[in-house]
Amino acid sequence: MDNPLILKLIVAFLLATWMVQIFFKKKKMTHLPAAIAEANARERHQWRHIRRIFRVMQIACTLYFIVLACKVMLA
């Protein structure tokens, strides 16, 4: 990774995909039957810790790449 341009492109791509994921979330379907809606809610509740861990890892990797890019630009 000696080329700072490639590193900047990687960081820009990761930030762009992260922003797209934040702003363009899937819309919830409101016309589901009650049993299916309850099952979906239970499943979301069961997987909440895994989703949070994934989100923390995503933020940590983004911050790592930003710090790394800043070090490359200042060096």
Image: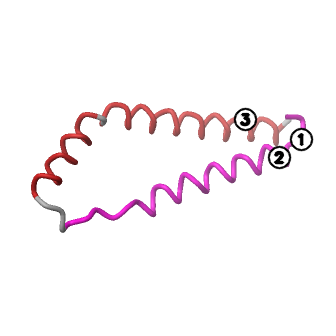
Q: Is residue 42 magenta?
A: no
**Badge nearest the viewer, 2 or 3:** 2
Range shown magenta: 1-30
Three-letter code for the amino acid on which mark 3 is drawn: Leu
Residue identified by numbered label 2:
6
Three-letter code for the amino acid on which mark 1 is drawn: Asn
Q: Are marks 2 and 1 in contact (CB under 8 Å)?
A: yes
Report how far apart the C-alphas of labels 2 and 1 lie in the structure. Answer: 6 Å
Q: Is residue 16 left or right of residue 68?
A: left
Residue depicted at 45% across the width and 56% down the height: 22
**Badge nearest the viewer, 1 or 3:** 1
Residue identified by numbered label 1:
3
Q: Is residue 66 left or right of residue 4?
A: left
Residue depicted at 17% across the width and 46% down the height: 39
Task: Compare marks 1 and 3 and give the one earlier in the sequence.
Answer: 1
Structural crowding at the residue carrying mark 3, measured as other residues with C-alpha within 10 Å and reported as few (<14), some (14–19) or many (≥20): some
Report how far apart the C-alphas of labels 1 and 3 lie in the structure. Answer: 12 Å
Q: Is residue 44 left or right of residue 75?
A: left
Residue identified by numbered label 3:
68
Residue depicted at 13% across the width and 49% down the height: 38
Total marks drawn?
A: 3
Residue nearest the viewer, comparing 28 with 39:
39
Q: Quadrant of residue 65?
A: top right
Three-letter code for the amino acid on which mark 2 is drawn: Ile
Q: Is residue 6 above or below residue 67?
A: below
Query: Of helix, strand and loop, which one carries label 3?
Result: helix
Q: Is residue 59 above or below residue 24?
A: above
Residue nearest the viewer, comparing 38 with 7:
38
Residue 11 on image: x %, y %: 69, 47
Q: Identify the image quadrant of the C terminus.
A: top right
